[in-house]
Image (cartoon, rainbow, N blue to C red):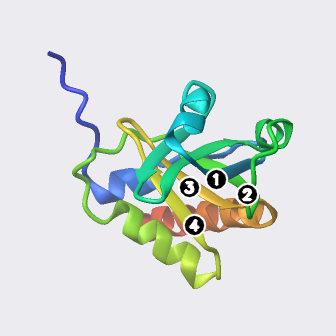
Amino acid sequence: MSDHSGETDLDHLIKNMQPILEDEDLVFCSLPPARAEEYFVLCQGYYVEREGITVIIGKHLADLNDLSYDLLFKRISLNVHSSMAAVGFLARITEVLAAQGFSVNVVSAYYHDHLYLQSDQAQAALETLLLWQDKMSQEDID
């Protein structure tokens, strides 16, 4: 078995997070289990809750299938391989974004972390992350 445990060093994670904003508008839909299953191969992720199964899918797909949703989101993927055991990485990121008034929904996967922000705020959130990353790198140099 190969070791793919990822990075745990907070400074390394911040300096190398490489946030990428994706273009697609996404939605979170809550569906009954039988209905949700048809979207599993098409969704970016799903989560089983007591009330139903939440699927994260493209807005176009939700609209084509008359699925209800509340808000539009865009995804920022952090392209550093973070460990599932890394301490403080997402806490720091969400703190920086919250300080600027951004609401963020986070999904951590095996290799990367993904931030879902309201579509109309995603570009500004990306710029905030990049400025913060640059500031953190400059502080390390000084």
Q: Secondary structure under badge 4?
A: strand
Give the number of the mark in front: 4 or 1. 1
Q: Could you classify mark 2 by the number of other residues whose Cα lies within 10 Å: few (under 14), some (14-19), or many (20 or more)?
A: some
Most extreme residue toward the top is: 1
Give the number of the mark in front: 3 or 1. 1
Q: Residue 91: percent from the left, percent from the top? A: 38, 69
How many callouts does the rendering have?
4
Report the residue at 76% width, 67% height from top.
121
Report the residue at 60% width, 27% height from top.
38
- Residues at circles 4 and 1 in contact by the CB criterion of under 8 Å: no
Q: Secondary structure under badge 3?
A: strand
Q: Residue 135: percent from the left, percent from the top? A: 54, 69
Query: Mark number for residue 110?
Result: none
Q: Is residue 142 visible?
A: no
Q: Mark 2 sits on what residue?
A: 69
Task: From the viewer's perspective, tell me whether residue 139 is left or right of residue 37.
Answer: left
Frontmost residue, 132 versus 89: 89
Q: Quadrant of residue 64?
A: top right
Q: Mark 4 sits on what residue?
A: 104
Q: Mark 1 sits on what residue?
A: 28
